[in-house]
Image (spheres, helix red, strand yellow):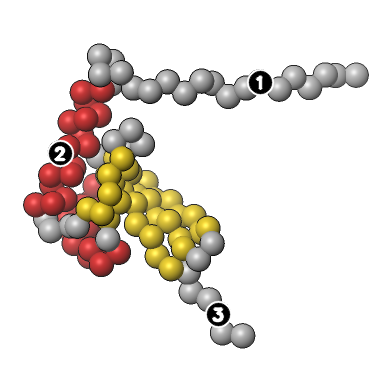
Amino acid sequence: MAHLQLVPPPAYRPMSIISQEFLPKLAAFNDLTRAMRESGVTIEAMSFLDGRIFVRLGDLDLLARRFGHEVRAQRCRTDGKFTRHVVTIRAVDVVWFTPIKEQDQ
C-alpha cells in the first residue's frame, strides 16, 4: 500500500533590500502609483510586500481610460457580501471591491 507523505509549504522569506528583484519591483510599484495619482485615480491603500494597490470603485472609469491597454490579467472572487476584482498592470496588482447583487426573492 502506498504511503501519503505530506510536505509542508515552502517557508515564506521576506524580500531583502539587497536582493536583485527588490529595486525593479520597487521602481515598478512607485511608477504605477505615481502615474495613477497623476491621472486622478484615488489610491485607498497600498501593500508593497504583496504588490497590491487598492483603488476606489468610483475611479474605475479613469483607471480604464488611462491604463486599460496595460491590463495583463483579470481575476474576480466573491467572498461574503463583496467581490474582489484584481487586474495586473505593470506587474502590480490593482484591487477594488464591489458589493454583490442579491436577487429579489
The front one of 16 and 74 is 16
Residue that badge 1 annotates: 7
In the displayed structure, 4 sits above or below 40; it is above
In the displayed structure, 27 sits above or below 46; it is above
Lateral position of residue 80 relative to residue 74, left or right: right
For the residues bearing labels 2 and 3, Cβ distance under 8 angstroms: no
Q: Position of residue 40 (x, y in %)?
A: 12, 58
Q: CA distance from mark 1 to mark 2?
A: 39 Å
Q: Position of residue 78 (x, y in %)?
A: 51, 59
For the residues bearing labels 3 and 1, Cβ distance under 8 angstroms: no
Q: Amino acid at mark 2?
A: Asp
Residue 78 in view (yes/no)? yes
| Outermost residue to the left | 38
Q: Secondary structure at mark 3?
A: loop
Residue at (48% x, 74% y) in the render: 101
Q: Secondary structure at mark 2?
A: helix
The front one of 46 and 105 is 46
Q: Residues within 10 Å of mark 1 (few under 14, many from 20)?
A: few
Marks counted in the figure total: 3
Q: Amino acid at mark 3?
A: Gln
Q: Which mark is residue 31?
A: 2
Q: Earlier in the sequence, mark 1 or mark 2?
A: 1
Q: CA distance from mark 2 to mark 3?
A: 41 Å
On the rendered image, what quadrant is the C terminus found in?
Answer: bottom right
Residue that badge 3 annotates: 103
